[in-house]
Image: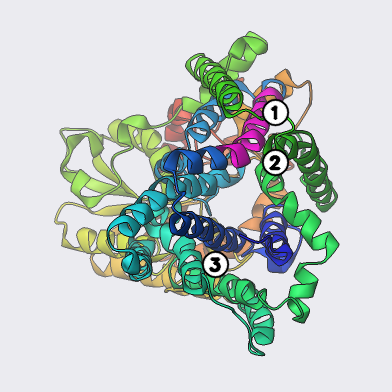
Amino acid sequence: MTYRADIDGLRTVAVLLVLVFHFDLFALGKAGFIGVDVFFVISGFLITAIIRADLEAGRFHFGSFLYRRVRRLYPALLATLVLTLIAGWFLFLPHRYAELATQTLMSLLYVVNFYFWQNVNYFGLRADTVPLLHMWSLAVEEQFYFFFPLVCWGIWRWVPRLLLPAVVLATLASFGLGLLFTPTKPELAFYLLPTRAWELMIGSVLALSVHGRAVRGIWLYAMGPLGLCLIAASIVLYGPLTQVPGWFALLPTMGAVAMILGGFSSKAPVTRIMASSPMVWVGKISYPLYLVHWPIRIFLQEHLLEFTFGWRLFGFGLSFVVAAAIYYLIETPVRRGTFLARPKHYVGLVIGLSVAMVSVSAMIRNNNGVPTRFAPEVAEILAFREDTADRFRHCNSLAAQKDQTCALGDKTAKQDVLLLGDSHALALSGAVDLWLAQEGRGGALLFNHGCMPVLGAGRDRCRAAIAAALEFIERSATINEVVLVSIWRQGTPEGGKPFDGRWVPESEVAGIFGKRLAQTVTRLRAADKRVTIVDPLFAAAGSVPETLAGNIAFKRAWPVDMPVAEHQATFATVYSAFDSVLEPGVARISVIDPFCDAVSCRAVVDERPLFSDANHLAFGQSARIAEQLRIQTQSD
């Protein structure tokens, strides 16, 4: 296929969208992940053009195809993984290093997307701690490169004229799967090939449609601006409740298609811009730039108390320096054959290095991140990360209420108390269990991760969960009291919040939260249930065990305590809403008093972390909190 400089320019657009998003450089960069969608279209277009040309000339060979892909893509990948693993030795605590080794192993085998499907929500709170999260898209592409050429070869061998119709049908089928699973199984739809393949195959359809044809006409001048507008619309129209990929992915992918079409006219203004020297240069290093930017961001954030704009800008620039070094010193010499020109030498070295990397990664993983790199106290403190209510972890569905392991308190007493809330209810379950047992009462736990126990709050999953929980409580003849527990941050105005299936702006959150809380309490009181609202615990700036361990390992003094004034200011509107629903049969209690003075709240009590992370109560602190529950409920 003839080289097109404008496509390198389009790669620049794609990679800059991703970098701006990940380094959080502009307010309008929140949808920068669409750069990956643009990359998918480019890859599908170029690979299919190569495959079609080889099939037509009778020179297609699957082994040769894979060899060219490995020669093109593997050196930069291997270099990035080696550098990341070396940096992690010095910069990551053991548990983070073990996780990095696992992700490295999966990335080498191009199956890391399956791992993230099961373990990471790309838009969730944990995502910005996952050092190789961006590798999911490379895994999807490599899986596509493995299956798609074989399918094309099979169709071409028997019925060549059906190649384009077959690819069109496969594209529509994959798109349909994406629409089906995006709202119901979002992680599956985001990470896996069957629901993402259509984005690559849109490029394939374009390549097959224009193959052997002269694409010309004045209309091409409009394609570049149209493509840019569609990509820009993706950025502007994206909102916190937008389901990805779903219908939304049509905007950037069709924008990429339009820009590739427009590029057939070398005189079109947008084509000239895309083919300019600066755009082409960034496009040429876009692959290593994509590879290195995310680990750089993670390492910087890991060792900065505040990841300020200046540091984010520094990480952005450093990514270009490292990417250029990999491109000029490793990727280009290997691709051009000035280094390891003979296939058997190259394949032998790649296999040897890959086996070595797999072995090293497996060793690090099996040795729990090599904790001997640090003082023994580091591992001792990190062990508090596991101080959680594991025996109640499955009590996150109504079906689990039939399981006696979800019972709290006196197991011989009637279950008249239901502890209801999000993961903070799970964290508090040990304390409630002890408190109820001391009172000779029985209870049960029902929680849903990330779901505040207020009608209409959160995304679809949460709204359905709380509605079902209230119906269950209203039908119950034994439950007399409901204890509502949450982090309650979903009720704070900052940044806006999801309520009733829409994103509520910051200025309206306090009002809508107050109304929905009042509706929740009213329904429970109408069912003759007492309601106890537990105030939120304070939060540390970061994971308490990890911060304390990092302070020892890296000889720093990061704080873990929370200023009282900051905690009160954060939840001022939430507390106001709590007070507005107080009436006979409704109580509000707090358990943080023993840990706070007039200035700050302590996250370390008797040399033990109060939390297993930044804000979830450590299970080992249950007895202390149970005593506070007893005191608070007696004084109520």
Say which of marks 3 and 1 sits in front: 1
Residue 164 location, quadrant:
bottom left
Q: Are marks 3 and 1 in contact (CB under 8 Å)?
A: no
Q: Taking the image as drawn, is residue 505 in sight?
A: no
| Residue 142 percent location from the top left of the image | 48, 45
Mark 1 or mark 3, which is nearer the start of the sequence? 1
Q: Secondary structure at mark 1?
A: helix
Type of the residue with mark 2: Val
Q: Residue furthest front?
A: 57
Residue underneath mark 3? 240
Q: Are marks 2 and 1 in contact (CB under 8 Å)?
A: yes
Residue underneath mark 2? 292
Type of the residue with mark 3: Pro
Residue underneath mark 1? 83
Q: Quadrant of the N terminus?
A: bottom right
Q: Mark 2 to mark 3: distance in Å?
A: 27 Å
| Residue 527 percent location from the top left of the image | 23, 66
Q: Mark 3 to mark 1: distance in Å?
A: 34 Å
Type of the residue with mark 1: Leu
Q: Secondary structure at mark 3?
A: loop
In depth, the one of 83 and 79 nearer the eye is: 79
| Residue at image location 74% in from the left, 76% down from the top | 266
| Residue at image location 72% in from the left, 29% down from the top | 339
Q: Which residues are magenta?
A: 70-88
Q: Badge 1 local density, few (<14 within 10 Å), some, or many (20+)?
A: few
| Residue at image location 51% in from the left, 70% down from the top | 211
Q: Secondary structure at mark 2?
A: helix
Say which of marks 2 and 3 sits in front: 2
Q: In the shown orientation, is residue 213 left or right of residue 289?
A: left
Residue 548 within the magenta-colored segment of the rendering: no
